Amino acid sequence: MNLMYNSTRNATLRVTASQAILKGLADDGGLFVPETIPQLEASLEELAGMSYQETAYAVMKQFLTDYTEEELKDCISRAYDEKFDTREIAPLHEAGGAYYLELFHGATIAFKDMALSILPHLMTTAARKNQEQHEIVILTATSGDTGKAALAGFADVPGTRIIVFYPKNGVSPVQEKQMVTQKGANTCVIGIHGNFDDAQTGVKKLFSDRELALELAEKGFCFSSANSINIGRLVPQIVYYVYAYGRLLDKKVIAAGEPMNVVVPTGNFGNILAAFYAKQMGLPIGKLICASNENKVLYDFFRTGTYDRNREFVLTSSPSMDILISSNLERLIYHAAGKDAEKNAGLMRELTETGHYQVKDEMRDAMRDFSGGYATEEQTFAEIRRVYSECGYVLDTHTAVASSVYHTSYAQACGDVPAVIASTASPYKFARSVMAAIDGAADEKDDFALIEDLHRIAGTQIPRAIEEIRTAPVLHDTVIEKDEMKAAVRRFLISEGGTEK
Ligand SMILES: *Cc1c(COP(=O)(O)O)cnc(C)c1O
């Protein structure tokens, strides 16, 4: 029997996993959630001996039940291959008594690669299974990391095209260079004069433009989303928590059945929600520690039961966590409300209309596995400095937020239970902040000089993703006004037949 998926805003809506992946978001604006959380079939002892790919199959087959074994294994082997710079895919690195789960060894050196390297394969397989005749067009607005990871994932995947809009002056030089040098005839990268919100609003408009949808359907295209609310991004993220548990067993840090805690630098709440699902599957996880930067909406929520986005938006050195509306939290709210779609929809409406909502004690009780913490900019920089000076290990700014929260507020109380800290980006991606934290003066140097400095002090290899963009030719140089996005999409898909360079 297939595991079905409901919308968090309408429990009578039921679709298969592959349909949920194809659609991305439910028509009522809700997120797809599994009707029940399946249990892990593999025993905990077995996990110790399993490769990343084997673990991925063991987890994903429980959730994506309408995919055949052959289909899933094919998706997994195409995703987790030499694109990663280590065969372990997600190595666990011990430093200073904590275990850093390095999720940045993929093509774009941030944790988005863990899901976005498999999503294109899950999606094209889903299209085949559901007799979707149209070519899938992924539309994305990005503030940096997601765009490049989606481009890398979808480049040259047959049956797909991808169009990414980014704010011309709103991403870091490394992030921009990563995107505009993207190869693949099915890729299109466009800068817009405007900020991230303008790009995001423009993309939402394109998604709901019926005239455009009809015109494109006639030409054989349909839109889909690689956004983090797609269940096809969430399920692959459960895998690495199960894998981390296996590594701890293998290293004899714990015995089968003993718990680990996880600490996750959080923005949109996708990564930590995957850890929650892993726990629901039967993985012995104790605490789920949700770490925020100065945009500490989630910390306040877990502490008080009130979610309130009416506050100043702070730009920090961990930009991928600068978020005031954590979209994936909706899945936890739905779960905590006892799968009451109406109640959840009401709270979400309140959030849209007033910017806040409050949950009652019984709902807070259902979320008791979670606890929060936050780190200021000063604490984040101090943590990078501390871990480097004590262990010689260099953290990126996002990981440092989590590490700071753990060591400041939890380490002592957690005793012998090992902490797995999700390490979400390579320090090379944020070399300017990292070098500023470690040796103070970074202002007068360019990004590549700082990368060289980092290489010297860290003694780690400069990732291929960085080496490649140093010399790679710029292939995308289109920059448009924000009201020209529709015309740009039509040009790429219809006039140029997808060979835009
Ligand atoms: C996206 C991202 C995060 C936040 O992850 P969520 O799943 O959105 O909570 C943290 N760190 C880095 C480096 C990211 O790219």
Image: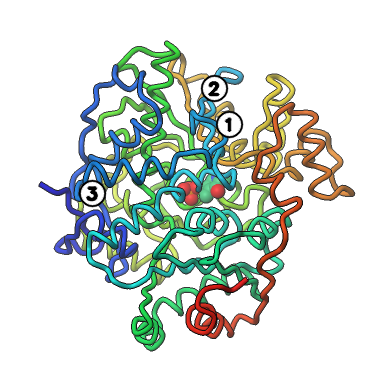
Instruction: Give the mark nearer the N terminus: 1 vs 3.
Output: 3
The CA distance from mark 2 to mark 1 is: 8 Å
Which residue in the protein does label 1 denote? 403
Residue 272 — which label? none
- Measuring from the top left, give residue 373's x and y in whole percent: 52, 38
In what element is the residue under mark 2? strand
- Measuring from the top left, give residue 403's x and y in whole percent: 58, 31
Instruction: Give the mark nearer the N terminus: 2 vs 3.
Output: 3
Instruction: Check disc 2 and give the amino acid type.
Output: Ala
Circle 1 residues within 10 Å: few <14, some 14–19, many ≥20: many
- Measuring from the top left, give residue 188's x and y in whole percent: 56, 69
Mark 1 CB near ligand 1 (8 Å cut):
no
Mark 3 CB near ligand 1 (8 Å cut):
no
In what element is the residue under mark 3? loop
Q: Is residue 199 left or right of residue 391?
A: left
Position above or below: 264 against 172:
above
Position above or below: 127 against 84:
below
Which residue in the protein does label 3 denote? 67
Q: Which is more toward the observer, 125 or 28?
A: 125
Corner quadrant of residue 278 = top left
- Measuring from the top left, give residue 56's x and y in whole percent: 35, 36
The residue lying at 42 percent from left, 11 percent from top is 252
In what element is the residue under mark 1? helix
